[in-house]
Image (cartoon, rainbow, N blue to C red):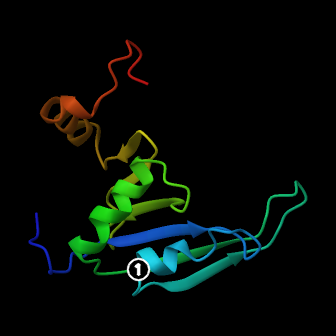
Amino acid sequence: MAATGTSWPVIVIAQDYPKSDLFHGWTKKALPGSWLWKTLAPDDDDVLESYIRVSRAVDRAEIDPLLRSIADDEGEAGSCILTVPSLAWLYAPYAGGADVIAPTAHLRDVLRSEHTEWLSVHPSGL
C-alpha cells in the first residue's frame, strides 16, 4: 500500500446524480482532480440524466473517505469503480460490500483464500 500523500496509478470512474438531485456534485467533492468524462442523457425508461467523472493517480487520502462513504451508504456517495490503466482488475464498492473482478480464476481464488474476512457468511457466498 502506498503511504498517505502519494499517488497510485488508480483510475476512479464514478457516477454522479442529475443536476436536479440534492446530492449532485458529490464526485467533484470526493475526487477534486476528476474531470467530466461523459454525460448520459435520460433514456426512454425515465432513467435520469447522470454524469460520469474520471480521476487518475488518486491519492490514498481521497480513496479512504470515498470507500468509507460508499460502504456506509451515506446519502451523498454514489457508485464508482476503481481500476488501473490496463483495466486488469476492477473493484466496485457498494453499501455493505464490494465486487472484485480479477483477471484470472487463479488470482480470484488467491484473493478468496487470503481475504476470507471479505466474504459473506451466507452459504451461497452472496
In the current view of this chain or complex, which residue is farthest to the top? 123
Q: From what the image shows, is residue 91 above or below residue 39?
A: above
Q: Residues within 10 Å of mark 1 (few under 14, many from 20)?
A: many
Q: Is residue 43 left or right of residue 26?
A: right
Q: From what the image shows, is residue 31 above or below residue 42?
A: below
Q: Residue at x 46, y 79 (%)?
A: 29
Q: List x then y, in percent, for residue 62.
A: 30, 73
Q: Which residue occupies the foreground of this view, 72 or 123? A: 72
Q: Quadrant of the C terminus?
A: top left
- How many numbered badges does the structure rendering display? 1
Q: List x then y, in percent, for residue 12.
A: 40, 70
Q: Is residue 6 left or right of residue 18?
A: left
Q: Quadrant of the N terminus?
A: bottom left
- Give the image quarter of residue 116: top left
Q: List x then y, in percent, for residue 120.
A: 34, 25
Q: List x then y, in percent, for residue 86.
A: 33, 69
Q: Which residue is mark 1?
A: 55
Q: Residue at x 28, y 37 (%)?
A: 105
Q: Is residue 69 left or right of residue 74?
A: left
Q: Residue at x 41, y 47 (%)?
A: 72
- Give the image quarter of residue 9: bottom left
Amino acid tagged 1? Ser
Tell me the element at label 1: strand
